[in-house]
Amino acid sequence: MKKILLAMALLPAFTVATRAAEDKNFDYHVDRFADIEVLRYEVPEFNDLSLNQKLMLYYLSEAAQSGRDITWDQNGRYNLRIRKLLENVYRNYTGSKETADYKAFEKYLKQVWFGNGIHHHYSTDKFTPEFPQAFLEEQIALLPAGSLPLTQGQTVEEFKAEIFPVIFDPAVMAKRVFQDGSQDVIVNSASNLYGEGVTQAEVEAYFDSVKVPNDTTPISYGLNTRLVKKDGRLVEEPYHLNGLYGPAIAKIIYWLDKAKGVAENDAQKEYITKLIDYYITGDLKLFDEYSILWVEETDGTVDFVNGFIESYGDPLGMTGTYESYVNFKNKKASARTETISGNAQWFEDNSPVDPRFKKDEVKGVSAKVITAAMLAGDAFPSTAIGINLPNANWIRAAHGSKSVTLENITEAYDMASHGNGFNEEFVIDQPTIKLLEDYLYITDMLHTDLHECLGHASGQLLPGVDPDALKENGSALEEARADLFALYYLADPKLLELGIIDNPDAYKAEYYKYMLNGLMTQLNRIEPGKDIEEAHMRNRQLIAKWVLDHAGKGKNAAVELVKKNGKTYVQINDYAKMRGLIGQLLAEIQRIKSEGDYKAGNDLIQKYAVKVDPKLHKEVLERYSTLDIPPYRGFVNPVYHLVYDDNGNVIDVTLDYTEGYADQMLRLSDNYGFLE
């Protein structure tokens, strides 16, 4: 499994202090449905940028949104047609919108929009419509002629026979990403990353046959291809201008070229040019060359990610889903991350792992706090709060990595969470609540900084170890490794010495939150009777349960679950001992990764990360139900407008925050539906 570097945003459930919003009347709340709340985020200090910087953000945002349909199609081969069907019904509906069937239909459509397809963005389970099939049949009959997404020569009845089981039959395409290693994870996954009839054994054998032995600079095999069967043979179909997704990629290239014209420096122009060349050809060696140029350019204010990046959607962790982040540097807040990255070698040298697995020289680690300006593809509507790229181990070792913390996204989560009652329900006592109120915001941000900047950048594979050796467990174990590194150093006096925190006990806020979330509160995202499957949730439960299991018993327990007034609480008795346990687990998971020890990694995952205590789960769900806190959140983007003078020259770019959720989704389909 290649290195997985995206840290998914954990729902901030604690009330913490943060900076005042630029507009004190800014409304973060947009929509609420099912288990999801949609928010909006501010783009502070946008108006302080130069015209060329604003234009670059505008062009990059257009490039980002141009790939939207790629993500939808990668998530499932029927997604684009189902989206068009549902949107046409929504636009043309003339009946009462107060009926139960219509409200259920609207809820389902909003879920599909949020999931970039018919599967939940986090659990990857298929959505269950709460309206009958007869309702959709009736609406199809009322649609204008020519508005159904029929294939060539297909009748309406044939279309319904093809599409209705995908929507209504829970057994058809039930899970987008299937990760139970006891069964074929490719055959049982509904994503569109592999062709029909391709098996896990065939995929593994194919890539074993094409990988170059002892290659010290391997390409990211399978990153931008769909593996299909043709005449009984496996063939890679690459994503590029004249291949799969060509119409959308052509638009991405167009806007990247416009952005290159207003780039801040020659280095930016060079890496954008290389990215365009990669999109034209699909050549993964060019992608590596682009990645090197990108990671080494650190002078510009504006930056972006655009491409087939993270492989969480592939159960084998190889093929990247399209995503894009457009952003600019928060110079004031970046002082914190620059201090951390400037001391990367000290953190590597002093980590509790075996010296064989440490880097002798940490190269090119750069970190900054950014202001997100546009989220797209797999980063929208649900997004990360921190990113560390590139993924290729050899590039990171030889050329370094870039880490970013999306502070305006974290702030939007926080501002929308004030006064939700979570602390009073789940935190064990008032002193601990006070600790969280005083220090959770800064330690949460530091945890993200350390996770992305140092955690993913730490350690090394032993010579000859396949980056994909951990297979379906690679994502969860990599995230656990980065989390453990961050947790371990949050408690280190070095952070006080560097002036990043001002209280040696501040780390305890993050330790408490982490254990509470890993053991209990993240279970709010799991349906009764189901296992944990998402990589980041597995990571968090793995760490929390392992620490609890090794924390000791009775008076000597570092951490325990206790009962108060019939409710379960996390109680931490010895934070220093807990840190020692974190160091032990970090050392073991680094060994597993460095040696490619699949069995040991799988044993950890199966013992600690997957199964849920049904009694505790039931209690958590009941307690959450009294708070009315949505388990998942995501965002709409601001809308960018070009301002012209009387001669047709662009003189400014402005932001509009007023667009609603449904309006934004329909506009995106209208303006960026390049693959329909």
Image: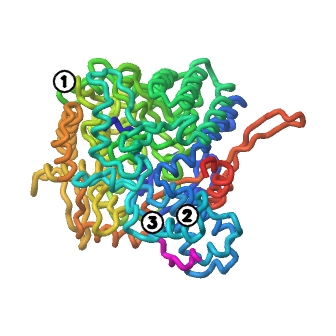
Q: Quadrant of residue 254?
A: top right
Magenta part of the protein: which range? 129-137
At mark 2, the secondary structure is helix
Q: Residue at position x 76%, y 36% from top?
A: 652
Location of mark 3 (residue): 127
Give how far apart the Cα atoms at labels 1 and 2 are. 50 Å
| Dot 1 or dot 3, earlier in sequence | 3
How packed mark 3 is, by other alpha carbons closer than 10 Å (few <14, some 14-19, many 20 or more), is many
Classify 361 as above or below 337: above
At mark 1, the secondary structure is helix
| Dot 3 or dot 2, earlier in sequence | 2
Q: Position of residue 315 (x, y in %)?
A: 34, 48
- Give yes or no for contact between labels 3 and 2 (Cβ–Cβ under 8 Å): no
Q: Quadrant of residue 31?
A: bottom right
| Dot 1 or dot 2, earlier in sequence | 2
What number is the disc on residue 618? none
